[in-house]
Image (cartoon, helix red, strand yellow):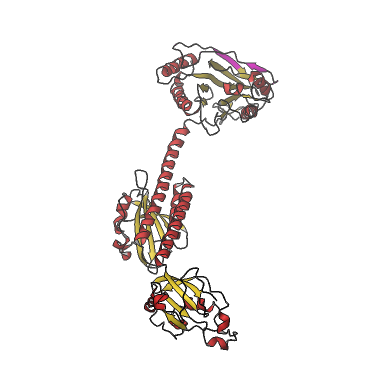
Amino acid sequence: MLVDTSQQPPAGPRGIDSGTTWGAAPYPVLVADPSGDVVEVNAAAAALFPSAVPGAWLRCVVPAWIADAHARTGSPAADPGDAASGSPAVEPGDAASGPPTSPVHGPVGDRTFEAHPTRTDDGDVMWWLVDDTDRRLAEDALASERKRTAFLAGASSALLSSLNVERCMEVTARLAAEHLADAAVIVAPPRGRKVPLTYCGPDGDVVHRQVQADLEQLPGLSDALRGFPPVPSRWIDPAAVPEWAVPDRFTDPVGSAVVTPLPGHGVPAGALVLLRSGRQSAFTESEEFFARLFASRAGAAMSAARMYAEQAAITTTLMRDLLPPQLHSVHGVEFAGKYLPSGQADRVGGDFYDVHPGTDEGQETLVVLGDVCGKGLDAAVLTGKVRNTVQALLPLAEDHQRLLGLLNGALMNSHHTRFVTLALASVVRSGGTVRLRVTSAGHPAPLIVRADGLVETVETRGTLVGAFWDITSTTVQVELAPGETCLFFTDGITEGRGGPLGNELFGVRRLESALARCAGLPAEAVVEHIQMLAAQWVGRGGHDDMATVAVTAPHHAHLSAVNGHTRGRYTA
């Protein structure tokens, strides 16, 4: 049989001068016969395995992973005790017919080797040992970096999946406790004397708490909250970690601690405290560096969540005065309104309405419906200014022309180049009748649906506000009997394009026909019906802002007196 020379040079330990061939090889080489006895070793193998001398039993002089691999090459029983176990014996001559095993790996002391078997002509097995410690260390380091990179990518996705500050802190604490330490504590910037903390222990449960604590008790914590670089963990005495910085369910003594800042956008988002018990190894420099990489991502996510929360709070506060009000019955008259902005993501726009109740039943209630030129946020800003100005001019509400003139002057003197159309109505209940004084300033004339379904147009007209220095308008007085409604609307209703072909206007005629079917309905039902039909007409197509306000004389409203002498109040 020829020697397998695919990986190593040919060798012949029996009858060949090893000193001129494999004996001088820089790699450890040893030869064993099929029975497991050492036949010959070179100088490198003798230095690595001092007990490996010819005639020694292989299993006694080399690590078990080499001896086991040699046994799998087809040797008889490497251990004399195998005969007693009933294993069939293999003759030395038969061993040569078995193929050598693939290379095997294992440790020798503090190094790792790869052993390559080669069968000789005599049936022996020659083992070439290659030191692959450095390669394996590099592979392990690469695998570790890949694992860390994958963890950071997953952590970034988990942290950025929510813009809720509390949720972001929970995810940070849970990921840190699961992958970086035995327990983690998120220290948020103090609020006065109280320090918000988020704990996560070995059990994975997250707890939020506020404590009154001295931050100087934990070395490096106060500096981390100010954004300064972290102190090395070897400078932190584990016994000095205060009780408030340890989760309740972390019962083991603290063996090692890391304090690192959570960087934010200009302002630190807090600090991350990592804890390991005394049963675990202390944090290495590599682990501290990796913790800082994680903390940088967590801090950015938490900072973004805080910025979003602050902006959302500001938006909510500002939006509160821009959103249309909820209308209800006032002094025996039903009021209802509905608004649909042009953009699906918008909540406010250029259309608006307000109802300013009179001080008592004898005082007129002012209804204002307006349409600012434009859409979106820019139009909403002017909408807020117009609404605030009208509210400031309420003492002059009895004179519609004067109110409109003062409003026009305010808009002409501002930096805005937009104009607005308005419809005003002063409403008061008198017995079973509702009386209105209606004035239009460039706005579509309102419609009245009578009890019998007849639809009338209120003949009022005027100049739009904010475009010319001189404006004119006419005021018309109308009355509503019980069950009758006066509908105010913006041009987004009548000019909405849709229908079968998608380009036909909803139009005034279609609006009048829909309103006729609303005879006798409450104000809320009227606006819901009109808005539903208009929205269905435009479908998914673009449209302008749509706003409607209904003023209805109820069927059964009546006055009730508390003591039979004082003036009563309308109950419906």
Where 509 sits versus 292, above or below?
above
Dominant secondary structure of the residues highlighted in magenta in the image: loop
Q: Residue furthest bottom?
A: 84
From which residue to which does the magenta span run? 451-478
Q: Is residue 167 magenta?
A: no
Is any part of residue 432 visible from this angle? no
Q: Where is residue 528 drawn, in percent x and y?
A: 62, 30
Residue at 39% from the left image edge and 69% from the top image edge: 279
Q: Position of residue 314 (x, y in %)?
A: 43, 37
In terms of image quadrants, where is residue 502? top right
Q: Is residue 463 left or right of residue 516?
A: left
From the viewer's side, name the closer residue of 80 and 437.
Answer: 80
Q: Looking at the picture, does residue 356 appear above or below residue 461?
A: below
Q: Position of residue 161 (x, y in %)?
A: 49, 47
**Picture residue at 52% right of the left edge, 30% below the top:** 325
Q: Residue 520, position in %: x, y?
A: 67, 25
**Residue lying farthest right?**
452
Instruction: State which quarter of the image contains the C terminus.
Output: top right
Q: Nearer the viewer, residue 215 or 496?
A: 496
Viewer-nearest residue: 346 or 313: 346
474 magenta-colored = yes
